[in-house]
């Protein structure tokens, strides 16, 4: 039965996706329709995660599709939420797939606040499950062969994708199972197994022997590459190395076997025998070194039968010279499999739960665009308001239009009366004073929110620094001081805004104190207001003069300019444009958004005409004010000058200026109140963000402390020491050979009973000398029993890790030398019992007495050093 390597699944801890994602949605999206749709999508995403990684999965394609759909959804969600340690913090915990823990419990695991880490682990599980599904296929059927090849190639592509992306997705050292070295090796292993499946299918379809030989040779090359990658690394279970070495030999033996058939058809009988002999040697190596994992009995019988027949025919009929294997032509390779490219979506049943939500890059660009738009609108509106205030100030300094209305000298001018009524209707002094009293309360509330947010960050950072100083390098997580830098910068910006707002409030209060007396006078009844204004001798001769008519015409034009500005301001504020479509198009085309260029260009189109209108209005006002000042000088020269008239005019000027100041102060205070209320919502969001990240950091801290405690508990308190031989447990009785498994290091099903413990390791096999590069082996091991009465001398382990036999002839393209012989890994880690040498009937076994007692070594073998206890590090 063929042995195929399948990978166990990683295990994870439960993560609540609903609470943090829902909080982000409710604070980001204002309309109830959007919120409801996205909140339902969050619930579906949480259910999908539980189905994909929160329960055991069957080795079926439907289970694989659930994993792929969840992976696709993670890829779709990643650009739409600000997943990071200092924003939307979600901590994912995954265990190493190959770690079996220790006596004290626990296993190697890693917790990271990274969606890229979650994606990597989910894709690893998809590749692992694909390898398990492929290993379960019926390779005796054509459908099973096709499915196995498909799933192995999918697994190879997934592992290869992880190799290329894992280091950029994580900001920490990954666990060993998802390290680039491990997943790179797994990718080649899966590709080799896919190639082997194609070889099996070609054999089943009885294709030409030359084609089958090339397919097998390519599979052997893949297995050799995988073996070379993991030979000196401890990133995969030790038994994998033995399976890879055996598979390399087996596929090379199959290549030689089918190439011998090609040689027979060409009547090259010597070449046929040479290839069959080499094939038999390779199979013999597998049987002697790796019989625990792979059964080659059928293949060996077939090769020996063909070899015997070929030798017989050549000895009696053809008498063809048998060449050296190094002198034969290279077989050639045919790579017909390749790793599946990871193109999203991987699942055909995938539907984006957040299809209507724009990516975060677009959201950020929209935020910047809205900020630029607000700055443009404020600049245009501010320019018009400044021009209007300037106009009002100039007219107030000239006592216009009150001077034209006050030709009687003893009544309230109409404009002053209207200003007084306007102030009374708006609430007078009481409304302003109430707004002024509310500002400190609003300011204090915002300062308290900001201070509480900083306090949470400071407390958590202090705790993190204390633990870092205590555990030093063991405290291997991002420092809180580094993590909180963006939040502290944002908070400092808020504090600066509050300080500037306090200064602006003081300016408004000072202005109010300057004009409050005149504002109070305007709030009085009309008779009291009239009595407070000094009277003067009228100059009735000016009532019908031309200069008065000119001034009134100019003032009417200025009023028209002001009304036009009010209409223009409303139009500017009403301009809307959906830039999200533009940003989405740019993101789809260029994979990036040049927000500044796109925003500035669009704003120029939207507000270019309004800029020209504002400039025209400002220039016209300047011209009218110049004409007003000229006409007023002529008007003033015609008036009789006396002290009473000057006093009256001065009071009327102050009243007009007080009205304008009242309107401006009221607007400033209302804007300040709105500013503080809006800032309160922003600061609450900032506080929630700080609270969320502090909570996530506390959870991560507790988890890390727990792991550190377990790690410290597993550390030895004293150096290891040798146990006396008489205290050792008796050796387990010998058992029969272990049957060849179908899969290697597959995951233990929780519902199945645990496997029995493996018996002790058997001694190393006899020394096997590899083929020389230029000649056949010179030292042939004896086929009969040893002649001496003593035990064979102890064998020293080789200086280099040994591997599968490779072709020994020169000029082999793609050939690299892998040492052969005793390998320290395949024989020492499975605790197999010592198996007596299997002899033919009548043949004596290895000489040597039985152990003298429990725990005593076999005579002739060097005593094994005590095995050092292994304590896994976190």
Image (cartoon, rainbow, N blue to C red):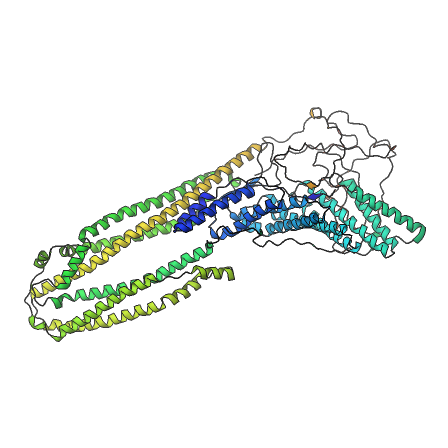
Whether residue 373 sits left or right of residue 551 in the image: it is: right
Residue at x 33% of width, y 67% of height: 610
Q: Give the image location of residue 517, x and y in percent.
A: 15, 55
The residue located at (10%, 63%) in the rendering is: 648
Which image quadrant for residue 418?
A: bottom left
In the image, 575 versus 63, the foreground residue is 63
On the rendered structure, is 615 left or right of 140?
left
Q: Residue furthest left?
A: 537
Q: How many marks?
A: 0
- Looking at this view, is 131 or 239 the one in front? 131
> What x and y, as percent, mark residue 421?
16, 58
x and y, in percent, of residue 409 in the image:
7, 65
Give the residue furthest to the right: 316
Q: Position of residue 735 (x, y in %)?
A: 75, 31
Residue 602 in the image: above or below residue 176: below
Quadrant in which the N terminus is drawn: top right
Q: Quadrant of the C terminus?
A: top right
From the viewer's perspective, is 406 left or right of 139?
left
Quarter of the figure with residue 518: bottom left
């Amino acid at each position: 039965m063929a042995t195929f390597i399948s990978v166990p699944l990683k295990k994870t801890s439960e993560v609540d996706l609903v609470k943090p994602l829902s909080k982000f949605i409710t604070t980001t999206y204002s309309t109830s329709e959007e919120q409801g749709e996205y909140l339902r999508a969050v619930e579906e995403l949480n259910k999908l995660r539980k189905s994909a990684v929160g329960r055991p999965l069957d080795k079926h394609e439907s289970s694989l599709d659930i994993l792929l759909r969840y992976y696709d959804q993670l890829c779709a969600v990643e650009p739409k939420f600000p997943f990071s340690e200092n924003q939307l913090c979600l901590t994912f915990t995954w265990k190493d797939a190959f770690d079996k823990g220790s006596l004290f419990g626990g296993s190697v695991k890693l917790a990271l606040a990274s969606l890229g880490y979650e994606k990597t682990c989910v894709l690893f599980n998809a590749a692992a499950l694909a390898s398990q599904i492929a290993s379960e296929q019926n390779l005796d059927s054509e459908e099973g062969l096709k499915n196995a090849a498909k799933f192995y190639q999918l697994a190879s592509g997934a592992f290869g994708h992880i190799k290329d992306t894992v280091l950029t997705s994580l900001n920490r050292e990954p666990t060993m199972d998802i390290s680039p070295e491990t997943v790179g090796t797994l990718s080649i292993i899966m590709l080799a197994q896919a190639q082997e499946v194609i070889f099996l299918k070609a054999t089943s379809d009885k294709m030409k022997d030359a084609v089958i030989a090339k397919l097998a040779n390519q599979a052997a090359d893949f297995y050799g590459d995988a073996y070379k990658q993991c030979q000196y690394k401890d990133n995969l279970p030790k038994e994998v190395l033995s399976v890879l070495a055996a598979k390399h030999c087996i596929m090379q033996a199959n290549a030689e076997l089918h190439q011998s058939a090609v040689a027979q058809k060409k009547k090259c009988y010597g070449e046929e025998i040479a290839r069959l002999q080499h094939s038999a040697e390779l199979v013999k190596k597998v049987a002697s070194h790796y019989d625990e994992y792979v059964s080659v009995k059928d293949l060996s019988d077939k090769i020996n039968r063909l070899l015997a027949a070929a030798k017989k025919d050549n000895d009696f009929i053809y008498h063809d010279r048998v060449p050296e294997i190094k002198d034969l032509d290279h077989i050639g390779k045919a790579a017909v499999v390749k790793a599946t490219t990871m193109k999203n979506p991987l699942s055909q049943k995938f539907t984006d739960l957040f299809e209507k939500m724009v990516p975060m890059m677009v959201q950020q660009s929209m935020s910047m665009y809205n900020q630029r738009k607000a700055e443009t609108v404020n600049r245009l509106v501010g320019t018009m308001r400044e021009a209007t205030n300037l106009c009002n100030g100039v007219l107030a300094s000239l006592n216009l239009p009150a001077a034209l209305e006050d030709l009687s000298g003893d009544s309230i001018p109409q404009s002053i009366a209207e200003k007084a009524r306007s102030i009374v209707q708006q609430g007078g002094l009481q409304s302003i004073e109430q707004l002024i009293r509310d500002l400190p309360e609003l300011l204090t509330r915002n300062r308290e929110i900001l201070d509480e947010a900083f306090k949470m960050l400071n407390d958590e950072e202090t705790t993190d620094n204390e633990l870092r100083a205590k555990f030093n390098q063991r405290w291997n997580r991002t420092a809180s001081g580094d993590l909180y830098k963006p939040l502290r910068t944002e908070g400092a910006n808020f504090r600066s805004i509050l300080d500037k707002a306090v200064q602006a409030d003081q300016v408004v209060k000072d202005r109010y104190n300057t004009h409050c007396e005149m504002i109070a006078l305007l709030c009085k009844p009309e008779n009291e207001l009239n009595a407070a204004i000094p009277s003067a001798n009228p100059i009735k001769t000016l009532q019908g003069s031309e200069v008065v008519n000119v001034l009134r015409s100019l003032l009417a034009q200025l009023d028209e300019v002001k009304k036009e500005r009010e209409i223009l301001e409303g139009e500017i504020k009403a301009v809307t444009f959906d830039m999200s479509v533009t940003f989405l198009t740019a993101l789809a085309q260029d994979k990036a958004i040049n927000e500044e260029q796109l925003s500035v260009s669009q704003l120029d189109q939207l507000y270019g005409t309004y800029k020209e209108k504002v400039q025209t209005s400002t220039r016209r006002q300047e011209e009218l004010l110049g004409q007003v000042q000229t006409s007023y000088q002529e008007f003033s020269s015609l008036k009789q000058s006396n002290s009473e008239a000057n006093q009256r005019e001065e009071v009327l000027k102050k009243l007009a200026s007080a009205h304008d100041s009242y309107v401006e102060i009221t607007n400033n205070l209302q804007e300040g109140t709105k500013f503080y209320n809006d800032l309160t919502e922003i600061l609450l969001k900032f506080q929630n963000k700080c609270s969320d990240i502090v909570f996530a950091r506390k959870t991560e801290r507790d988890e890390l402390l727990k792991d550190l405690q377990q790690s410290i508990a597993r550390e030895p308190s004293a150096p290891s020491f040798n146990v006396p031989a008489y205290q050792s447990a008796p050796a387990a009785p010998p058992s029969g050979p272990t049957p060849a498994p179908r899969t290697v290091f597959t995951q233990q099903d929780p519902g199945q009973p645990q496997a029995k413990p493996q018996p002790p390791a058997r001694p190393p096999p006899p020394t096997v000398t590899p083929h020389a590069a230029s000649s056949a082996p010179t030292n042939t091991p004896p086929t009969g029993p040893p002649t001496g009465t003593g035990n064979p001398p102890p064998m020293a382990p080789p200086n280099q890790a040994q591997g599968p036999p490779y072709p020994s002839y020169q000029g082999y393209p793609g050939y690299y030398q892998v040492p052969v012989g005793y390998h320290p890994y395949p024989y020492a880690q499975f605790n197999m019992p010592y198996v007596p040498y299997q002899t033919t009937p009548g043949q004596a076994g290895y000489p040597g007495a039985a152990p003298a007692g429990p725990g005593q070594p076999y005579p002739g073998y060097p005593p094994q050093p005590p095995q050092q206890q292994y304590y896994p590090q976190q």
